[in-house]
Image (tube, rainbow, N blue to C red):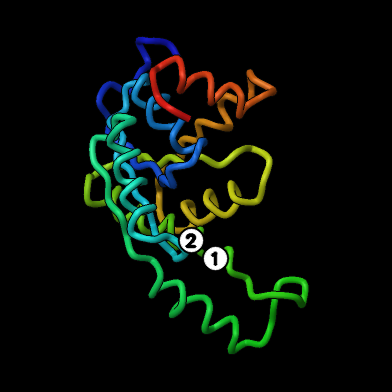
Amino acid sequence: MTKESLPMNQDIVLAFSGGLDTSFCIPWLIERGYRVHTVFADTGGVDADERAYIESRAAELGATSHVTVDGGPALWRDFVVPFVMAGEGYQGQYPLLVSDRYLIVEAALKRCDELGTKLIAHGCTGMGNDQVRFDLSVKALGNYTIIAPIREIQKEHTQTRAYEQEYLEQRGFGV
């Protein structure tokens, strides 16, 4: 991406967890001319202190705005209860609970619509199933452009996590 092709001040919504990958995404996107709005969909297992950390981390890294969504009730209503009632499990062992990715995407796309943007970002790598869950959910729910910073840097760096850490540290952010 050349400097002339930068999206100068376009809003983008980042599905944000506060971990290394999504923390890396904020300054990376900002340096490419985006105004980053983060969304954390709390689908359970996060206490008030962790929520506060995630919100402050987004601000520290330069997010223009942050929204935390309580995704727990929807996870139970729309996924856990129907899967348990169906009596089926992943490989016959446990309920298909990775469906929370759909809820995360849904919350992020709602924020996109509120901001009037069609740009969404996530911190999934180019190696796992999460990217498939995120990307297919986005595509199923509308006409949005997906930006995946971790996939982009994997094209040039084989030690992705080490690169992300160094990138953040060089910009004065703790890892």
Point out the residue furthest to the top here: 3
Q: Nearer the viewer, residue 175 or 70?
A: 175
Q: Nearer the viewer, residue 104 or 54?
A: 54
Residue at 69% x, 23% y is 158
Q: In the image, is residue 45 above or below residue 93?
A: above
Q: Which mark is residue 122?
A: none
Q: Nearer the viewer, residue 69 or 83?
A: 69
Q: In which quadrant of the rendered view does residue 8 lie?
A: top left
Residues packed near mark 1 inside 10 Å, few (<14), some (14 to 19) or many (20 plus): some
Residues packed near mark 2 inside 10 Å, few (<14), some (14 to 19) or many (20 plus): some
Type of amino acid under label 1: Ser
User: Residues under labels 2 and 1: Cα distance?
Assistant: 6 Å
Q: Residue 62, how many percent across, how many down?
A: 29, 30
Residue 162 as seen in the image, left or right of residue 38: right
Residue at 49% x, 19% y is 167
Q: Which residue is mark 1?
A: 99
Q: Residue 175, how many percent across, how many down?
A: 48, 30
**Total numbered badges shown on the rendered structure:** 2
Q: Which residue is mark 2?
A: 102
Where disc 1 sits, the SS reads helix
Q: Residue 90, how many percent across, how many down?
A: 71, 71
Residue at 38% x, 25% y is 27
Residue at 58% x, 21% y is 163
Q: In the image, is residue 129 above or below residue 174?
A: below
Where disc 2 sits, the SS reads helix
Q: In the image, is residue 110 above or below residue 157?
A: below
Residue 117 as seen in the image, left or right of residue 97: left
Is mark 2 in CB contact (under 8 Å) with mark 1? yes
Type of amino acid under label 2: Tyr
